[in-house]
Image (spheres, rainbow, N blue to C red):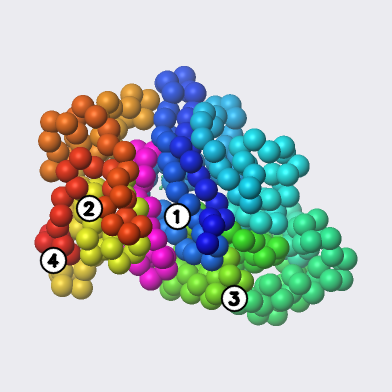
């Protein structure tokens, strides 16, 4: 199956008064039709900037995409004209964010916002668009959908607003849904509902999903494959079970160690990865994780490793590639 999306050597940086922030540093990956890929990594690792770059939504200045290629349906999205990009943004690739208020317009009713988008992208009439909007709101679990069309975003609770945003994201049956921590601000129950909803819709619509999260545990039940990002690079990529059972990058091992587990006391503090990520305005020469890495050897401080294939669909950027199994994780 040929990939739906191919990201190659993507580089995005911000030119600021404090220097050039190297937010995304040469990442490459494919997304296949219908698959769900999780992107995990700590705050500031370039997860959001990486996906926003796909649709050229990086504020410029200070941001610039300084290199790479993004192929979607035989087009390079970094080179196509704005009109083509707008068409793809509404019809083929949808983005949903953590905070629905940043993507919902507070002064327009929810109905108006969804129907406008449907009319613009699918060319339906007002009546047809309204019908579709009601069906979408019902699908995301909003009761009394017809009446709710005339409500404003602030008249919905946080969880419901998130559902409205998902409905908008799905309005045009996208081939790719990019969800940037859409559940982080929600309480755990609502979070679980939204995750189930996206799982269901993914099956029904057959769309591919890129799901960004800090939460490696959440990813387990949701993704086919996981990309682990550190300091603007992908340091490990693997099918979910391989990533959990035979992680090969010390950073991934550290993330797995910091997961809550049923055999741990609730009061027990989780081992966090010591140290802090590098200053992205002064990018280190070797592997960016080396200063925090308990496996590091001299070479790690001199040369930055590229991703290397270590198994089917499994790639790691590490000179050491420690082989541990799940039971050895602290
Ligand atoms: N407008 C901007 N100007 C300057 N630097 C920026 C800008 N936007 C992002 N950055 C920097 O780019 C880097 C990557 O940020 P990004 O938002 O992609 O991180 P993230 O992995 O999504 O983090 P989080 O988990 O907190 O959402 C960070 O160092 C951030 O400070
Ligand atoms: Mg982010």
State the separation of the CA atoms marked 3 and 2: 34 Å
Q: Residue at x 32, y 55 (%)?
A: 314
Question: Are the residues at dot 2 and dot 1 in contact (C-beta closer than 8 Å)?
Answer: no
Where's the C terminus, which quadrant?
Answer: bottom left
Which mark is in front, 2 or 1? Answer: 2
Label 3 vs 2, first from the N-terminus: 3
239 on left or right of 148: left
| Image location (x, y in percent) of residue 247 | 23, 57
Disc 4 marks which residue? 327
Which mark is in front, 2 or 4? Answer: 2
State the separation of the CA atoms marked 1 and 4: 27 Å
**Which residues make up the magenta segment?**
217-234
Label 1 vs 4, first from the N-terminus: 1
Quick check: can you spot residue 252? no
Label 1 neighbour load within 10 Å: few <14, some 14-19, many 20+: many
Q: Residue at x 68, y 38 (%)?
A: 80
Q: Which residue is drawn at 49% across and 64% down?
A: 35
Does the residue tagged 2 have its C-beta within 8 Å of any atom of ligand 1?
no
State the separation of the CA atoms marked 3 and 1: 21 Å
Label 4 neighbour load within 10 Å: few <14, some 14-19, many 20+: few
Label 3 vs 1, first from the N-terminus: 3
Mark on residue 248?
2
Q: In this view, does 120 lie above or below 17?
A: below
Q: Which residue is drawn at 20% across and 40% down?
A: 319
Query: For the residue labelled by badge 4, is the local secondary structure a helix, a strand or a loop?
Result: helix
Disc 3 marks which residue? 204
Where in the image, quadrant-wise, is ligand 1 located? top left
């Amino acid at each position: 199956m040929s990939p739906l999306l191919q990201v190659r050597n993507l580089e995005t940086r911000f030119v600021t008064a404090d220097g050039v922030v190297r937010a995304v540093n040469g990442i490459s990956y494919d997304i296949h039709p219908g698959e769900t890929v999780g992107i995990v990594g700590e705050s500031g690792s370039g997860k959001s900037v990486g996906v926003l770059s796909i649709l050229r939504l990086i504020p410029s200045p200070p941001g610039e995409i300084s290199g790479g290629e993004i192929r979607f349906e035989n087009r390079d999205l970094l080179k196509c004209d704005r009109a083509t990009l707008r068409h793809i943004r509404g019809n083929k690739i949808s983005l949903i964010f953590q905070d629905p208020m940043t993507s919902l317009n507070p002064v327009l009713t929810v109905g108006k916002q969804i129907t406008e988008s449907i009319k613009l992208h699918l060319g339906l009439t007002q009546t047809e668009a309204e019908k579709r909007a009601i069906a979408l709101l019902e699908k995301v679990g909003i009761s009394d959908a017809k009446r709710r069309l005339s409500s404003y975003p602030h008249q919905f609770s946080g969880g419901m607003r998130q559902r409205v945003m998902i409905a908008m994201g799905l309005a045009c049956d996208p081939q790719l849904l990019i969800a940037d921590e859409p559940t982080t601000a929600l309480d755990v129950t609502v979070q679980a509902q939204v995750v189930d909803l996206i799982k269901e819709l993914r099956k029904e619509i057959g769309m591919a999903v890129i799901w960004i999260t800090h939460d490696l545990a959440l990813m387990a039940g949701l993704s086919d494959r996981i990309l682990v990002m550190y300091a603007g690079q992908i340091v490990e990529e693997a099918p979910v079970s391989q990533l959990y059972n035979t992680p090969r990058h010390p950073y991934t091992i550290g993330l797995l160690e910091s997961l809550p587990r049923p055999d741990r006391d609730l009061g027990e503090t989780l081992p966090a990865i010591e140290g802090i990520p590098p200053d992205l305005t002064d990018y280190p020469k070797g592997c960016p994780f080396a200063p925090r890495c308990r496996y590091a050897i001299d070479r790690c401080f001199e040369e930055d490793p590229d991703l290397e294939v270590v198994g089917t669909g499994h790639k790691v950027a590490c000179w050491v590639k420690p082989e541990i199994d799940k039971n050895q994780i602290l």
